[in-house]
Image (spheres, rainbow, N blue to C red):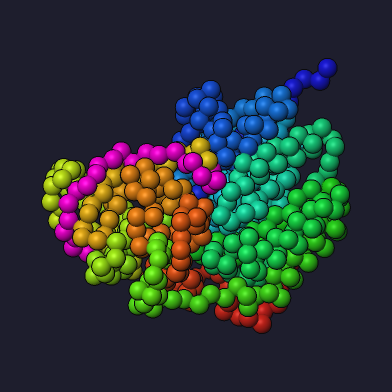
Amino acid sequence: MAEPLRIGVVGVYHETNTFAPGLTHLSDFSHCSTLGESPFMELFRHTRTTMGGVIDASLQDSITLVPGLYVSATPGGIVSDETARQILQQLTHSIQPGLDGWVVILHGAMVSESCQDMEEAILEAIRSRIGIDIPISVTVDLHANLGPNMSQLCNLLVGYDTYPHIDAYERGMEALQLLVRQIRGEIQPVIALARPNMLVVPQKMITTQGVMKQIMEKAFAMERDPDVLNVTVCGGFPYSDVPFAGMCFAVTTNGREALAQCYADELAQLAWSLRDQFRVEAIGVKAALRSVQEAHEGPVILVEGSDNVGGGSPADGTHLLQELLRLPQRSLIVIRDPDAVTIACRQGVGEVFSYPVGGKSDSLHGMPVPVEGKVRLLFDGMYTHRGPYMKGAIAYMGTTAVIEAGPVTLVLTSERVPPWDIGHVESLGLHPSSFHIIVVKSAVAWISAFGPYAKKMIEVDTPGCCTVSLQSLLYRHVPPSVFPWNSVAKEHAE
């Protein structure tokens, strides 16, 4: 009887917005691996996360899973060099020798002060410990910016198929299952990449509608070919200013390199032919508020993608708060402002709150707005995801205060937490149907939580580091030949 396989799993997960204010430091990362093996496994078991999928797949196949370093941080600014150095050092030390293979959980858009492709640095660090013969299966987010050397550093590449990302669990399972097949000699994977030379905003990457749905359907059709192991569609992350940012396609076949490249090129050509459908019309604050006034039924969701927490924004933009305070309709908005939370805690529940809120990170996202109201609730900020987006995962907003300021319910958090689950507000005793207007600082992922309640949705483009108006951002490394700047550029494949 063959010995059970022993497979390692590590992860370094960060989506870096190079336009966001401030640096991301080691203290911003959650170090799950420091819990010890058993608590680590229990933390992720029964969660609809990538790691949860890896764990469950290992249990189904009687595989011994050996966890190494796993760190993740909320999307944010450039990772400091010292943080990157410490993470790579900890990662290297956590790699156990003699295992049969490795699953590596990455985002795909991590950037440090001096390294534009941290995923490459991570995989090189792992390879330096295990050599070139041990297979590596990598998972990435749909918003990954795949570097030019990714396909040489790993054997398998599995990306999310959905946005909002509700298939992380399935992709984790798939990554381990394919790795096991390779270890057992059942498959010989080869990866080919192709790029259509396009920078696309997240609002156009919803996989269940529009142009992205058309591309995903083509990818799924390719996966029905028995020689194809996986087709990964990466929409890319336009807010990481790196030379290889943008859409990319990775096709993995069973030993058929030419077929893999043919399919990848075909997807790139399709995306390029549809490029004009990826354009977005920006709607300003005044126009958005006129639409709100015309809506007879709520809640109306004001989607402030330019301050998208899940895209690395500071989450303290005040452009909409300042307007909501002038409107008569009941509204709800969440803003990160730890200083304001401290003031609310000092005052106490039921007491008067008077303090300038938000606008503390930079001037781009707005200036502090004076708020007068009452402290309605103080909360520790922890809740568990109950919806389809990474169900079972724990979210932590930090100490949180709810302020009633006339018709505006203002939620003040100490930490930046994306609105990916309805617990974002229901954990505070707030229900979406109680409000006519709800502001979500998100691009698309909010749909999983608030979509079922929305009577109307309005995308508003306020000034911010996640704006859909990419031309307003100062790019230094993305070549000017890419779409949308050059709509007649030729697609190219790697």
Quadrant position of residue 382: top left
| Region in magenta | 369-390
Residue 159, given in percent of the width and then of the height, sits at: 65, 51
| Relative horizontal placement of residue 248, taking residue 472 as reference (left or right) | right
| Relative horizontal placement of residue 102, taking residue 410 as reference (left or right) | right
Residue 249, given in percent of the width and then of the height, sits at: 70, 60
Residue 349, given in percent of the width and then of the height, sits at: 18, 43
| Relative horizontal placement of residue 461, taking residue 226 as reference (left or right) | left
Which residue: 70% across, 66% down? 214
Which residue: 44% across, 69% down? 458
Q: Which of 308 and 4 is in front in this view?
A: 308
Q: Can residue 82 be seen in this view?
A: no
Which residue: 41% across, 45% down? 423
Quadrant position of residue 210: bottom right
Q: Quadrant of the N terminus?
A: top right
Q: Is residue 486 visible?
A: yes
Q: Residue 191, relative to residue 38: is it above or below?
A: below
